Amino acid sequence: MPERKPFLLRIDSAVLEAVQRWANDDLRSLNAQIEFVLRDALKRVGRSLPAAVEETATAAKDRGETSE
């Protein structure tokens, strides 16, 4: 599993509440939802992750694990 790094995020409370509702709908933790959104945005703009990180995330997804 890739190293997990803590990161402080200052965010508008309305945005945070909306992402929390989305996470609840998708049965994800807030942290996993934020990571999902960031990964999706990176893919859409062509900013790929290193292959080893992407393979690990794909393998975890295939096993039904979520990132916390």
Image (cartoon, rainbow, N blue to C red):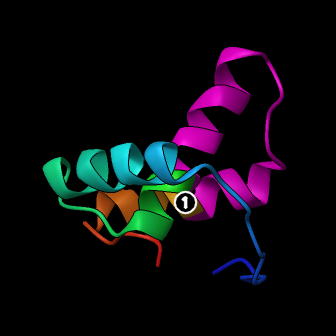
Magenta-drawn stretch contains 45: yes
Instruction: Give the farthest residue toward the front.
Output: 13
Q: Residue at x 33, y 56 (%)?
A: 20
Front-lying residue, 61 or 44: 44
Residue at image coords 76%, 59% = 52
**Percent from the top left, x then y, of residue 15?**
49, 43
- Residue 68 position (above or below residue 61): below
Q: State the predominant SS element of the stretch in magenta.
A: helix
Placement of the N terminus among the 4 image quadrants: bottom right
Q: Which amino acid does label 1 sit on?
A: Ala
Q: Give the range drawn in magenta.
A: 35-56
Q: Residue 60 is drawn in which quadrant?
A: bottom left
Query: Does residue 29 show up magenta in the picture?
Result: no
Relative image position of residue 42 (x, y in whole percent):
72, 31
Q: Is residue 65 left or right of residue 41?
A: left
Position of residue 11 measured from the top left corner of the image (x, y, whole percent): 66, 54
Few, some or many residues within 10 Å of mark 1 (<14, 14–19, 20+) = some
Q: Position of residue 21 (x, y in %)?
A: 24, 50
In this view, which residue lies farthest toward the top? 45
Residue 15 shown left or right of residue 4 in the figure: left
Q: What element carries label 1?
A: helix
Residue 34 vs residue 60, the one in the foreground: 34
* Residue depicted at 36% across the width and 43% down the height: 18
Residue at (53%, 40%) from the top-left corner?
37
Task: Compare residues 53 and 38 and report the one nearer the observer.
Answer: 38
Would you place residue 42 above or below residue 45 in this image?
Answer: below
Judging by the rendered image, the residue that carries numbered circle 1 is: 57
Count of picture labels: 1
